[in-house]
Structure formats: C-alpha cells, structure tokens
Amino acid sequence: METWTTNSSRRARKLRTRIQLAVRSGAVKASGLSIGRTTLLFLCAGCSCSPASCSFGSVRPDFDLKGVPGTLKFQSENAWAAETVDGRYRLFNNVWNSKAISGPYRQKVFVKEEHGKPAFGWVWSVPDSQAPATYPEILAGSSPWNGSVVSDSGFPFQAGTKKLLVNYDISLAASGKYDVTLQSWVVSALRPSKSVITHEVVIFIANESIPVDGERVAQTTLQGNAFSIYVDKNHRDATGNNTNTWTLISLVAEKPILRGPVEVSTAFDYLLKNGHLDAQSYIANLELGTDIMRGSGSAVIRDFAVTVD
C-alpha cells in the first residue's frame, strides 16, 4: 500500500508539472470550478469545435504568424488578395459580405513553405456581424464567380461520372462563430458562370454556431461520418448584389472532420440518388474555407490535394 501511494504521488506530480507547462505555454487553457473543498480543473486546447465547445474566452489571433513553422512565401490582408498554391490551387482572401460586419476587422491569408511543402491558411479577428461575412479559402477548379485556376484541373465534370477526392490536415485554433466547409458550385452548362448556377453544395466539416439555412430533410452516413442534410430551394446572395437564386444543400457533420482524405463525390452520389441533384448538372469546383461571423482565430492547412478521376 505504501508503494502504491509513492508511485501514485510521483505520477500526480508529473501530471501536475505537464499541465502547468502546457498552460504557461498557451497550448491549453484552464478554468477552475470550486465545489466545497474540491476544485475541478477544465483544460482546453484553445479551439471551439462542434458539437461541444471548449473555449474559455477569445483566442489571440497570430497575425505575425510566429506560431506557424516554415519560411514565409506570401501574406496579405488586402480584400480579395489571391495567390497560387502548389501551381494548382488559388488561395483567396474572400470578403464577400464584409459590409455585414460591425466595426473594423482584420483578415490575413498566407503561404509558408515547411519541409519543402506548402502550409497555408488564414488568420482573422472580427468583432461581430449580422450574418456570415467573410470566407477565406483555397479553391480548385472553375468558380462561377471568379474563373478557373488552371486549365487541366479536371473541373467541371458531370455529376456522378467521376471520383472527387480531397486531402487536407487542418490545425484550427479559434473562438466565436465560425465554421470550416468544403463547398462546390453546381451548374447547368460546361462554361461555369453565375447565370447557370443551379446548386451550392456545402459540407460542414466543423461548425461553431454558424446558422445552417434551409429545412432539415434527412440524416445519412457517408464514409463512416454522420451528417444531417438541409435544403434551401430559394437561396440568394446575402449581399443583395446578385438577383439570381439557387438551391443550397448543406451536409452538416455530427463531429468535426479536420483531417482527410474525404471522397466528396460520395456526397454528390447520395444527392443524385435521392433526387436533390440532376444527373445532367456539372460540378464546377471545390473550395475549402471558413465562414466567419464573430471572434478570432487561425486555420493552417497542410497536405492539401484535390484529385478528379
């Protein structure tokens, strides 16, 4: 019994030391709750992720990028700034609905080189907004709004005819209202433009308090991940700058999926099978980005690759 007590005490001291070092370094946050003589200690890695929040206050945005290893290749806080990544993808400082933000805000996109590979992402600080206001992103394919990145991307392609796979590894530290999504625009013609948009398909791979538009119509499991399906048949541009409407389909993951690979075409196959997409429609592109309403944080993406086979 004496030996057990000694070993247990040593383990407790080591654990206490590790916790103290982690809190001092900022790797985790701590909050205490006292109940009588007992204090409960809650630890958090600084990231608010659905379905349960673990944030005990705002996350300090790393605009200096000191916490991101590697050599800086590009950075910009300019609205709509763009940079080609890996010769095939477009990093885009998308501020599409920034007029909804109350007060000044900051948003930066960046690219670093780490061990010979690109590590890119975005940092933000937004005081508050009435709706999703910005969407910093990486894009592959041909956007109906912003054109093609490269000519041999494999996009657009007819729905249900090809396999679309995306790989990524996301390091996310954020608080407030935000999400991380995979998004594709669906069009009725092979030359994508906003006039031929029929659908917007959004896969929420993380969501912290961003409202999901439309009616919940189903639940399903794809690649072992549970999703709720929402459909808004008369969706429109929240800025009011465009009058066309389209069908918004949202697949909301029950748990965060911050590491790939994800076979996005299984979602299109499901939507085709259940009558939500037309077999004569075309998938124009794939985007990975963060809708931001309020708060601060950063997202760093590594090992990003999109393949169309």
Image (cartoon, grey):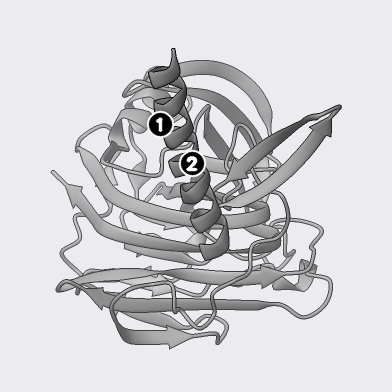
Q: Closer to the N terminus: mark 2 or mark 1?
A: 2
The residue that mark 1 highlights is 278
Type of the residue with mark 1:
Asp
State the residue at coordinates (41%, 80%): 82
State the residue at coordinates (48%, 26%): 276
Quadrant in which the C terminus appears: top left
230 horizontally vs 271: left or right: right
Can residue 143 be seen? Answer: no
Q: Position of residue 299 (x, y in %)?
A: 47, 61
142 horizontally vs 54: left or right: left
- Judging depth in this view, the residue of 27 and 148 nearest the camera is 27
Can residue 59 be seen? Answer: yes
Crowd rating for badge 1 (residues with CA inside 10 Å; few <14, some 14–19, many 20+): some
The residue that mark 2 highlights is 13
Type of the residue with mark 2:
Arg
- Judging depth in this view, the residue of 179 and 200 nearest the camera is 179
156 horizontally vs 61: left or right: left
Q: Position of residue 14 (x, y in %)?
A: 43, 43
- Quarter-of-image position of residue 103: bottom right
Residue farthest to the top, as pictured: 1
